[in-house]
Image (tube, rainbow, N blue to C red):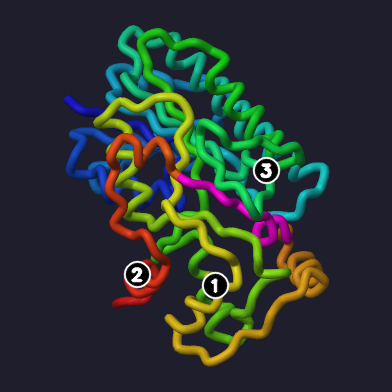
Amino acid sequence: MKKLIIAAGTGFLGQVLINHFKDKFEEIVILTRGKSQTIDKIKYVNWNAKTFSGWENELENATVLINLAGKSVDCRYTKKNKKEILLSRIESTKILNKAVLNCKNPPKHWLNSSTATIYRFSLDKQMDETDGEIGNDFSINVALSWEKAFFKTETPNTLKTALRTSIVLGKNGGAFIPLKTLAKIGFGGQQGKGNQFISWIHEEDFVNAIDFIIQKEIIGVINIVSPKPIRNYDFMKKLRKAVGFPFGIPMSVFLLEIGSFFIRTETELVLKSRNVIPKKLLENSFKFRFQNVDDVFQNLLSK
């Protein structure tokens, strides 16, 4: 019997995964901070992502474990939030490592979230899994610590893959909804200089890539991004066209700083140049359905 466990699977990406895998696994278990219950044949089991409380028994005989746990980075980087961002990733990964090692029949394959933000700011070089250059700032150091916590513990009977995911563009959550809103009200101009690259992936390619990784048993670090990063000003221009708004007021760094203060987020989320490509997926002959953002916007804006 095929069994899928998704840790922290109640958010946007968890829902995308559930919709894709619900007919491919006989049993799906979601580890959640909410109450334990069963809805539409999906079993939700309470966990605090730090200690054992019975949830760990669910890992027995699992085919696949996907861990999405971690506080959202869409917040102000206060001392308290920085600590939570780091610890929520490290603690959940460490406790899952312990749980996997304690299993008599551990999950066959464990895919752990990571981030394409692990690479340095780049306007020139495209970053892949082999030659990508790691930078040095808060977000990058979180990513490094996260992957270290994941790979440091050896799990002899469980394959391990770290998913260096970029911005996932989807209909019902993630970054696309606020960006679309900005474009519709006239604030869809370039952000900052506009020359920074955006690495993105359509939600369908995101989940198909994960399915592909499971089927092919690809391990190590993998960039979950589309093959064509796009500059911010081109991305916003195409988005304006897609939503049918004739102009977009550009947002200078100064205005972004003011705006991000009021909506309690950080400008890094839009100003960092993420110039990342999916070398491993392409080498393994993964076929992307969405390779340019025009098709993505058309798809996501259709009824």
Residue 211, position in %: x, y? 29, 39
Q: Nearer the viewer, residue 272 or 68?
A: 272
Q: Are marks 2 and 1 in contact (CB under 8 Å)?
A: no
The image's mark for residue 120 is 3
Disc nearer the start of the sequence (2/3): 3
Of 98 and 200, the residue lying toward us? 200
Q: CA distance from mark 2 to mark 1?
A: 14 Å
Q: Amino acid at mark 1?
A: Asp
Residue 46 appears in the rendering:
no
Mark before the other along the chain sequence, 2 or 1: 1
Is residue 251 found left or right of 175 in the rendered image?
A: right
Please identify the quadrant where the N terminus is shown: top left
Which residue position holds label 2? Answer: 295
Q: Residues within 10 Å of mark 1 (few under 14, many from 20)?
A: some
Q: Which residue is mark 1?
A: 234
Residue at 37% across, 16% down: 158
Distance, label 2 to label 3, CA atoms, is 28 Å
Judging depth in this view, the residue of 39 and 211 nearest the camera is 211
The answer to the question of whether label 3 and label 1 lie on touching residues, with beta carbons closer than 8 A, is: no
Q: Which residues are magenta?
A: 267-277
SS class of the residue under badge 2? helix
Disc 3 versus disc 1: distance between alpha carbons? 21 Å
Can the viewer see residue 4?
A: yes
Q: Quadrant of residue 213?
A: top left
- Which three-letter amino acid code belongs to the residue tagged 2? Asp
Seen from the viewer's position, the closer of residues 23 and 267 is 267
Residue at the (63%, 79%) spot, across then down: 189
As shown in the figure, which amino acid type bears the numbered disc 3? Arg
